[in-house]
Image (spheres, rainbow, N blue to C red):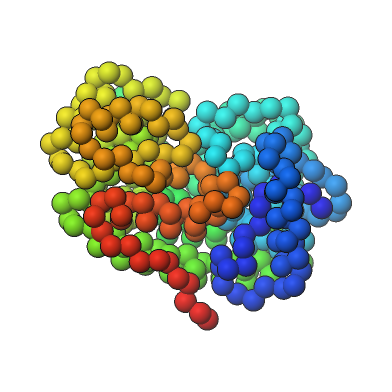
Amino acid sequence: MKISIHRRAIADYPGKQSLLKLATGVILGFCLSSCTNPEANRAGDSSGNQPQVVSTSTIIADLTESIASEEIQVSSILTPGVDPHIYEPVPADSIALENADLILYNGYNLEPELIKLMNAAGVNAKKLAVGEVVLPLQMEKQAAMTPDPHVWGNVMNAIAMVNAIRDSLSELSPENAATIQENAADYTATLEELHRWIQAQIATIPPNNRRLVTTHDAFQYYAQGYGLEITGTLIGISTEEQPSAQTVTRLVEEIKRTQVPAIFAETTINAQLIRTVAEEAQVKLAPQELYSDSIGVPGSEADSYIKMMVSNTRAVVEALGGTYTPFVVAEN
């Protein structure tokens, strides 16, 4: 069976794991070490009789992998570190979508070109806009209000996404529904712990320092869910936008006015502009970049949704003057 996205480490979520899952993880480790070419990770191998689930983003693929039965093949079109806002599909993506039994995409126009491809191609698969199960925040874009697609920034929203994925997988593979339901329950319990842990971590930051300045507007849900204020961003909710000189100047002035202790770059966006802002505002650029639209590459500190949220929280807490305590999953 071709595996197109890494399976999580056994320690990443609670619940009893079978020897089969352990063996799959070992095999996958060898696969990932030799598959650094993005084309090698391309979704869409329809060999065998397993239901084929294709995800458009690494975050959705990771949530799905966390709860899916071993009898369901989960793959991702995007690979870790790729920006869904500006991704340009390749011919292999059409094949992946056409071979799918179920397509899981974020929606709210996070991945605009993939959504266009999905709607234009001869795709007979069932489709679920996973992010659209969450009531969105509305952001201004070009003098109009548009839904903010970065819903996973609040872990409670990720739980709603997991519930929707659980139901779709159970419908796709009813013979494996019991396993899917059990996996989802275990994973949700871990997400609930994660949500409480983030709240406690952010609470250690001095109140006047609870401000975020980032490259693009991807952290509104995170800020709203955990008591932070978005002081400013270089660009809006889509990374296809380009900041004007006026925008940069306004942001520098706002940073100086609010005296934030640090600002943040992001892993999927060139850091040069935000580095320039930091220099002009004479403020520290946080040493750890934030993960916004993608999980980290396999083997990194953020190669799952949970680890991504932990990494981001640690970066924010340490840069803004809080006290970081490692996230530990309670034993059942």
Q: Is residue 259 left or right of residue 115?
A: left
**Residue 179 visible from this viewpoint:** yes
Front one among 3 and 189: 3
Q: Is residue 10 left or right of residue 209?
A: right
**Residue 146 visible from this viewpoint:** no
Task: Give how far across and how far down residue 288 sits, in percent.
Answer: 39, 46
Front one among 177 and 273: 273
Q: Which residue lies furthest to the top in this view?
A: 245
Q: Which residue lies furthest to the left in this view?
A: 257
Q: In this view, does 41 lie to the left or right of 245?
A: right
Q: Is residue 24 left or right of residue 12?
A: right
Task: Give how far across and how far down residue 99 sits, in percent.
Answer: 78, 41
**Residue drawn where x is 40% and y is 43% of the image:** 289
Task: Give how far across and how far down residue 63 sits, in percent.
Answer: 57, 56
Q: Quadrant of residue 314?
A: bottom left
**Residue drawn where x is 65% and y is 33% of the image:** 118
Task: Give how far across and how far down residue 56 sits, in percent.
Answer: 61, 41
**Residue drawn where x is 20% and y is 50% of the image:** 209
Front one among 161 and 65: 65
Q: Quadrant of residue 274?
A: top left
**Is the residue 159 above or below the residue 282 in the image?**
below
**Residue drawn where x is 66% and y is 66% of the image:** 180
Q: Which residue lies furthest to the right in this view?
A: 48
Total count of labels: 0
